[in-house]
Image (cartoon, rainbow, N blue to C red):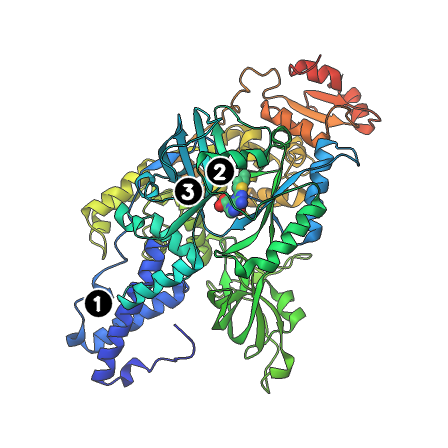
Amino acid sequence: MSPRTEPKAVEKLTRAEAEAELARLAEAIAHHDRLYYQQDAPEISDADYDALRQRNAAIEARFPELVREDSPSLRVGAAPAETFAKVKHLKPMLSLENAFDEADARDFAARVRRFLKLDADAALELTAEPKIDGLSANLLYEKGRFVRGATRGDGTVGEDITANLRTLKDIPQRLKGTGIPDLIEMRGEIYMQRQDFIAMNAERAAAGEPVFANPRNAAAGSVRQLDPSITASRPLRFFAYAWGEISQRPAPTHWEMLERFAEWGFKTNPQGKLCFSIDDALAVHAKIAETRAALPYDIDGVVYKVNRLDWQDRLGIVSRAPRWAIAHKFPAEQAVTKLNDIIIQVGRTGTLTPVAMLEPVTVGGVVVARATLHNEDEIQRKDVRIGDTVLVQRAGDVIPQILGVRIENRPKGAKPYVFPEHCPACGSTAIREPGEVARRCTGGLICPAQAVERLRHFASRDAFDIEGLGARHVEEFHRDGLIRTPADLFRLSARQEEIQEREGWGKQSVAKLLAAIESRRKIPLDRFIYALGIRQIGQATARLLARNYGSLAAFRQAMIEAQDPASPAYHELDSITGIGESMAADLVGFFAEPHNIAVLDDLAREVTVEDVAAPAGAASSPVAGKTVVFTGSLQTMTRHEAKARAEALGAKVAESVSRKTDYVVIGADAGSKAKKAAELGVMTMTEQDWLKLIGEGA
Ligand code: IVH
């Protein structure tokens, strides 16, 4: 609710006011339900939403005769979003790393040069293309015919929207021209031009239909329609800019690939340029930034890509983003507004985050009503006080931030903000460890905020991916004691009847939910680890851990043994590339809590955790499963590249030598690691030996 319109107390409402208020609430709740359930784009917090529903219920309790036919209390949620069949992309759809300024962009070019070992005078050709603010799509063409189109989804599996995409003029049904591969996954952006968007919204408003917040939401909403004739009526367009699986490459560079795309009948972005250096690319960025407002569609940066495809291959991928591309974002947009309040949110890992509640303001086309204040020190440093006038910034998809305060507008008597020392959710003490910026609730699983957040995370798409179990269901089920820990989810079937009787549930929907839960009883180790919600352990790290330990039993055992920092288990954990000391501390800390182990063991009894299979192509590799350490400077490749290649063959690459090391590859000027290997009797070899071993040597 907008803080401007402080609602009148329910007991003071007249009958006429109550009637009007119920009408307003019915509309508002329906609106938020649609945003939440169908568009995955809530505008207000769960607490604010609950407040709307509570107010509605309170008014209805006072004036039962005024309960409307369409009262929100008579239903839960909106009709579920239309569902589409899932399709697995042949090659994952990657995301892009961001560069926020010139220095980041130059770092990118320098990184690429180092990785490729380019001489100082060697040219690095880059393409520079606008980053379209739409949604990406994957279009499969077989023998030049469009056979299937899908949304990006989680990057691995998307939704089949073929019928809808066939209605787009920019998506050719048949490719024409030369060099068409037998099979290609075309990738690009579906978007809507600003003018089209404005006209469409005007029509919708006139027809009493809800309007979209921005062209991107409009495009996303239009593409996810069950009835293709609706999609056909929407002004959607498509730019091609990349590809996934391909049977044979018709050209050796990205730029020539784009030329082919155009020849085959796709639209490619006319602002795209081939650049001969990072300086060139930065100049294109500056020019596009200047003319951005005049472009007919929204863009949020410029994407730089290494032009040579053989170099792209060598550079490869890190954590779902190619090393050969980067998105150089435009500076964020800003606005001035009033800070009405500061509330404290408790995150899944117990971190207390201060959130600024703002007088709603439009920043770059989106209404912003809250912004992060990061932490206690940030508030102090900026001396942000309730009632202040503040400068808000929004950059792309990033959470809006408060840049600073207009002291001259500060109301008299505004007091410095005092950060609470207790968790607002459970009352436990919130402590701040030395050297940490965050204050953290010590309540663990007894803290409802953490339990609910942990359960939500557990069921989320990248974790257990339990379809149909939305955040609000988790909250409800937790509140009513149906689920307290993750394992409880797998015992819900025993309470089928009880759930069926709940508001908003029926026999079918419960059966569907239980089936979705059942289908997740088998889970890969990395997802399992990620689902535990251990601080700092994201997807990429969970994958590293899964790959290193191979099975849940081995992982669990190692984490318990690693409690002792002098143990070999701790040494092994610490030597996994990508796991720093602070991550190791969080892992060990998690396993130091008996209640966490109890929760994990309880869960492990309910599910089957799959061991990690060696990476594709690695089964036959002589180094699969071996632990390798590279030391000294290598001649034919950089350390980074050596590591990437070894890992692709299923080897583990460690930073330090231990008894568990299988091979130490010694380059020029190797130091203590070579010595340590000799001491421990670990096998050492030259770079040439290594290349021979992996079948790449002369
Ligand atoms: S290339 C491997 N080029 O940005 C890289 N992406 O943050 C594949 N995007 O999911 C993407 N314009 O939706 C590329 N000219 C462009 C783009 C672009 C927009 C989007 C795309 C991608 C996201 C990554």
Q: Is residue 438 above or below residue 678?
A: below
The secondary structure type at the circle numbered 2 is: helix
Q: Nearer the viewer, mark 1 or mark 2?
A: 2
Crowding near the residue tagged with mark 3, few <14, some 14–19, many ≥20 C-alpha atoms within 10 Å? some
Is 158 positioned to the left or the right of 441 in the image? left
Residue 285 spot, x, y in % from top left: 63, 52
- Describe residue 402's horizontal placement relative to residue 425 as left or right: right
Q: Does residue 396 appear in this view? A: yes
Residue indicated by mark 2: 262
CB-based contact (under 8 Å), mark 3 and mark 1: no
The image quarter in which residue 211 lies: bottom left
Disc 3/disc 1 C-alpha distance (Å): 34 Å
Q: Position of residue 635 (x, y in %)?
A: 78, 24
Query: In the image, is 508 to the left or to the right of 408?
Result: left
Front residue of this view, candidates 71 and 529: 71
Inter-mark Cα distance, 1 to 2:
53 Å
* Rendered location of residue 477, percent (x, y): 32, 53
Give the residue type that dot 2 points to.
Ala
The residue that mark 3 highlights is: 153
- In-front residue for pair 32/461: 32
Image quadrant where one finds the N terminus: bottom left
Residue lying at 46% horizontally and 27% vertically, measured from the top left:
180
Q: Earlier in the sequence, mark 3 or mark 2?
A: 3
| Residue 74 shown left or right of residue 696 in the figure | left
Q: Amino acid at mark 1?
A: Ser
Q: Is residue 127 above or below residue 400?
A: above
Say what amino acid the circle numbered 3 marks: Gly
Residue 71: assigned label = 1
From this viewpoint, which residue is outermost toward the top? 698
Residue depth check, mark 3 versus mark 1: number of the one nearer the observer: 3
